[in-house]
Image: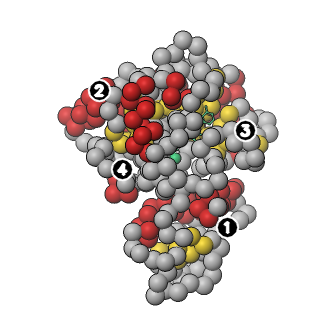
Amino acid sequence: MTIMSMNVFIEALRANNLIILPTETVYGLGANALSDEAVLKIYKAKNRPTKNPLIIHVASLEEAMKYGVFNEDSLKLAKHFWLPAKTANSLTLVVPIKSGTKLSKYVTAGLDTVAIRVPNHPVALELLKQCNFPVAAPSANISTQLSPTQKAHVMLKDIPILEGGFAQVGIESTIVENTTILRPGIITKSMLETVLQKPVVISDGKVIKAPGMTKRHYAPQTPVVIDSILYDPATEARLGFGKDNQCTLNLSITGDIKEAVRNLFAYLHELDQKGYTRIHIAPLPKDQELSITLYDKLHRMIG
Ligand code: TXA
Ligand code: MG
């Protein structure tokens, strides 16, 4: 990535146009979060209901504090999980909006809170450092379809894509509001509890606090069967796990759940293009902390 080509993307954002940017979780569809015109383009391109608010992306906690009000707990989490901490990873914090910010009202869909994250991806960070505005970015998929974890899996047409390789996490960030996980991700309940030194709960989804967390989501076009043992290799595909190798692709030959999380969307995208009548997914570990995250994604595919 030359400086020249990075500039083209920054200029596009400044002109209130959309770009696709890499992050460590999934590719995002980015726009200047201060501009109504730019943010409305996101909803249109994704066919996303405007009542479903967006995450803003900034390069640092210092920038984040221009838009959100951080209490003791959210500060602890930001300092621990966002750069420059070594443990930096994929956490989105929902905090009250700071009064007087120039954030587009469409970013927050009328809520009095804003979702903010510092992505842990060098290309995204370089972009954000050079922008003097936050970048609103939902996953770069059409609403309800799978999120892209590599450039080739972006289905949105005619929007420039900033190349950033394979997303190393492979699923969307964990979203936390106070001590509640609104969306499970790679940052788990126990990791949050260790930092906060208090109990954290996972939202049961009955009250839809994160409006995007309606049941059906992240689904390939091909029907998915989970915890599946048998399949017909002539017409169907199967994602295996560990030594269970009767499969078209294996999510993790070594049986590593984090690797399975990383590969899940990418492999589903790949199989979805191939005209199978069904995609079967092998039983995955149910007794690990990331099992909650993984099965949350799987249940949304069949829900
Ligand atoms: O990993 C990620 O978070 C990716 C990358 C691109 O950063 N982004 C992403 O955005 O997953 P999106 O729009 O697909 O999901 C954002 C979620 C939605 O479920 C939305 O309802 C929720 O965040 N959200 C946004 N603002 C909120 C708020 N103020 N309160 C509660 N939930 C909020
Ligand atoms: Mg999404």
* Mark 3 lies on residue: 180
Task: Say which label, 3 or 1, has the lower sequence index.
Answer: 3
* Mark 1 lies on residue: 285
The front one of 273 and 65 is: 273
Q: What is the C-alpha distance between the residues marked 2 and 3? A: 37 Å
Q: Please tell me how crowded label 3 is: few (under 14), some (14-19), or many (20+) other residues with Cα within 10 Å.
A: some
The front one of 295 and 290 is: 295
Q: Type of residue at label 2?
A: Ala
Task: Say which label, 4 or 2, has the lower sequence index.
Answer: 2
Q: Which residue is pictured at 56% across the width and 84% down the height?
A: 231
* Mark 4 lies on residue: 156
Residue contact between numbered discs 1 and 4, judged by CB atoms under 8 Å: no
Q: Type of residue at label 4?
A: Leu
Residue contact between numbered discs 2 and 3, judged by CB atoms under 8 Å: no
Which of labels 3 and 1 is toward the front? 3
* Mark 2 lies on residue: 15
Q: Give the image's coloring scheme.
A: secondary structure
